[in-house]
Image (spheres, rainbow, N blue to C red):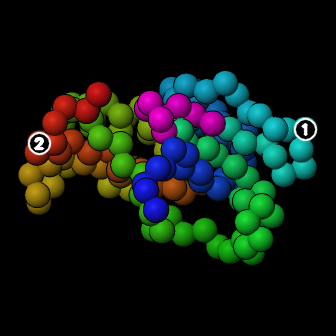
Amino acid sequence: MKPRVSVITIGVDNLEASFHFYRDGLGFPTDGIVGEEFEYGAVEFFDLQPGLKLAIWNRQSIAHETKVQAGSPSPTEFTLGHNVNSKAEVDDVMTKAKNAGASITDPAHDTFWGGYSGHFQDPDGHLWEVVWNPAWDEVK
């Protein structure tokens, strides 16, 4: 299988609240909620970078579509990494997330490996890492 990840879909409990968190709070670009005319179709797509989108979709709709019973969500299943170009940018994003209603679980700090990072949870508990890695080329 050739890696071609183009959409990361996360399950949410309240599509409208998550929509406002990502669009209004974090400023992610979107065309709005689509598919509301379908029983399990309402979904929101956000442009992350060229060729990659974030989708938010109701947990019950994901369970219906995949034929997998919905269980208790666990925020430690995965993290979404948001790489930036400086410590100051990490601090700026963390502040923006907090002001949008995120829960800061790990304030920005120098890491043991020489970088700088912090973690927050969105309204549904999904973990985001905001990180500056001095060994990586500039993030565009």
Q: Secondary structure at mark 1?
A: loop
Q: Secondary structure at mark 2?
A: loop
Q: How many marks?
A: 2
First in sequence, mark 2 or 1: give its number.
Answer: 1
Q: Can you give x and y, in whole percent of width and height, for residue 74 in the image?
A: 54, 69
Q: Which residue is located at x 26 percent, y 45 percent?
A: 131
Quarter of the picture holding the C terminus: top left
Q: Is residue 93 left or right of residue 53?
A: left
Span shown in magenta: 45-52
Residue 103 seen in render: no
Q: Which residue is located at x 44 percent, y 39 percent?
A: 98
Q: Which residue is located at x 53 percent, y 39 percent?
A: 53
Residue 134 numbered mark, or none: 2
Q: Is residue 22 left or right of residue 92?
A: right
Crowd rating for badge 1 (residues with CA inside 10 Å; few <14, some 14–19, many 20+): few
User: Observer-nearest residue: 38 or 102?
Assistant: 38
